[in-house]
Amino acid sequence: MAAIDVVEAARALIRCPSVTPAEGGALDLLQSWLAPLGFACHRLVFSEAGHDDVENLYARLGTAGPNFCYAGHTDVVPVGDPAAWTVDPFGAEVVDSVLYGRGAVDMKGAVAAFLAATAGFLEDRGPDFGGSLSFLITGDEEGVAVNGTRKVLAWLAERGETLDHCLVGEPTSDRRLGDMVKIGRRGAMNGRLTVHGTQGHSAYAHLADNPVHRLIRMLNAVTAEPLDDGSEFFPPTSLQIVSVDVGNPATNVIPALARAVFDCRFNDQHASADIEAWLRERFDAEGARYDLDIRVSGESFLTPPGRLSDLCAAAIQRVLGIETELGTTGGTSDARFIKDACPVAELGLRNATAHKVDEHVGLEELQQLTQVYRAVLEGYFGP
């Protein structure tokens, strides 16, 4: 089995313009590496009305249990203004031992690292390593996540195929590689609040009903005090007002409508339905006519510390010589779907430049992450 160079693999993946939902050649490339290693590769295209079709890849080596799965995505966010970049966003240039390009951190670099770790592991151990290895790679993580990981998991369930543990390669590290392994995520809720009033002349306010005043009081009712103080692995729930809009160009007209948008990241003390009920109770107390549109992209979840997080911590200690923190910070990821199938943890590169102009990763960090992933595999399947 030929070794795979992590840097060259990462560069090749970055050169694929796989902006969600485009495949961009990234899954073709990944399959071209996995198939010669003996993986049975399944290209899965899912559709749903109102959404783009999305290609996904599930590849498995072996039929016996346990099945250790690596999950990730090859889709990337748009580059923004290309002129703002100092390099070609899809050029995969290396400058002073740093690899630049969209997806270098989130998360083509990590996909390349696990690929290289897997190739090295199989080169030493051969195909009879005591179980199965699988890759679940989607092209719909940075988008609406409708035709991606969730549907791959449903496809696996229909086949009667199970995952025993899953490691997701999201960029979880903060100040240095390996300083955090995520064992859960906060829930994510977006709300759009529209308050109805009665338009009128501001000099005759008694003949109108000002929705702006009502909106201010309603927002204060849900932001003045925190919902909670956090829990063992979660920070306090955060509700942030991100937009207030009246759309009123006049200075002497009380408007008929006032709108606000908020984002709530909630911990494991709450379900989204409970938070919505809490919001409506406080909004109702104002006595205003209002509409509330709620969208939940994921519930909070926690995989309690156990075998998988212990393996990650041990691998980080062995390779990098540091103790890791088990955390739940950051946004959502596809781990919110995988946690219903098996225990899941997330471990990847530093997130400092994810989604930014001139996204980049050091070559040494890529090599180190490959070693950490290799140590996880060795710990999982034994020496």
Image (cartoon, grey):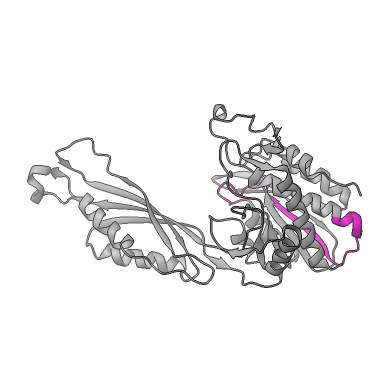
Q: What residue do we see at 69% from left, 65% from top?
A: 313
Looking at the rendering, in which quadrant would you find the C terminus? bottom right
In the displayed orientation, state which residue is furthest to the top: 83
Which residue is more in the foreground, 102 or 298?
Answer: 102
Q: Residue 219: where, in percent of width, then height?
A: 30, 57
Compared with residue 16, is residue 143 higher up or lower down, i.e. above or below? below
Q: Quadrant of residue 153?
A: bottom right
Left or right of 269 on screen, residue 218: left
Magenta region: 121-147
Q: What residue do we see at 49% from left, 71% from top?
A: 231
Residue 44 seen from this side: no
| Residue 302 among those drawn in magenta | no
Give the total number of marks visible in the rendering: 0
Compared with residue 27, is residue 380 higher up or lower down, i.e. above or below? below
Left or right of 251 on screen, residue 50: right
| Residue 131 among those drawn in magenta | yes
Compared with residue 227, is residue 95 higher up or lower down, i.e. above or below? above
Q: Residue 293: where, in percent of width, then height?
A: 38, 55
Q: Residue 59: where, in percent of width, then height?
A: 78, 54
Which residue is more in the foreground, 363 or 36?
Answer: 363
